[in-house]
Image (cartoon, rainbow, N blue to C red):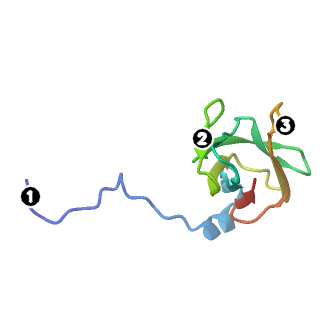
Amino acid sequence: MSNQGTIADPVRAKPEVDIDTLISLNPELLDDSYVYVHCCFQNRWKDMLVRIWKTTYLIDQATRSRSALIHAENISIAPMWTMVPDNREYTFLLIFGSLPASCEVFDLLEDIALPSGFHVTGIRRNETDVYRVNI
């Protein structure tokens, strides 16, 4: 075994991607990107439970195309529940599949047969596809 300096492990090295360069080369390469929606819920109650349903979508207002929920952070997927601290702001992250390239405005819809589902309308698309909404 040699005691020489170590060489970086190429398998573990993570290359950096310059998004501006990638877009200028081929905008189609970003079609498989994700949309990140940071949600904020102002809890004014005691012993509040929350959850998100897999039937939550981003809906392009122009084409009605739906982007499906792929992953949720800091909130349970139904039928499980997440306890929210009393009288505190609670945040969670929803990750969706990509929106159509032509999308300019979209809605966030929890499409369930209960009156507790939420609907945030008129979210204006931005270049990063990272958003913050109040639920």
The residue pinned by badge 2 equals 82
What secondary structure is found at the residue carrying circle 2? strand
Q: Amino acid at mark 2?
A: Thr
What secondary structure is found at the residue carrying circle 3? loop
Q: Which one is earlier in the sequence, the residue at label 3 or at label 1?
A: 1
Please say if the residues under marks 1 and 2 sit with CB atoms less than 8 Å apart: no
Q: Which one is earlier in the sequence, the residue at label 1 or at label 2?
A: 1
Residue 112 point in image, percent of width and height? 80, 33
The residue pinned by badge 1 equals 2
Residue 64 point in image, percent of width and height? 89, 44
Q: Amino acid at mark 3?
A: Pro
Q: CA distance from mark 3 to mark 2?
A: 19 Å
Residue depicted at 75% across the width and 40% down the height: 56
Q: Nearer the viewer, residue 78 or 3?
A: 78
The number of numbered badges drawn on the structure is 3
Is residue 3 left or right of 129 when viewed as pictured? Answer: left
Q: Nearer the viewer, mark 3 or mark 1?
A: 3
Q: Residues within 10 Å of mark 1 (few under 14, many from 20)?
A: few
Q: Nearer the viewer, mark 1 or mark 2?
A: 2
Please say if the residues under marks 3 and 2 sit with CB atoms less than 8 Å apart: no
Quadrant hosting residue 76: top right
Residue depicted at 77% across the width and 42% down the height: 57
* Labelled disc at residue 117: none
Q: Nearer the viewer, residue 56 or 17?
A: 56
Residue 132, placed above or below residue 11: below
Is residue 104 left or right of 85 when viewed as pictured? Answer: right
Quadrant hosting residue 9: bottom left
What secondary structure is found at the residue carrying circle 1? loop
Residue 121 point in image, percent of width and height? 86, 54
Q: Which one is earlier in the sequence, the residue at label 3 or at label 2?
A: 2
* Labelled disc at residue 115: 3
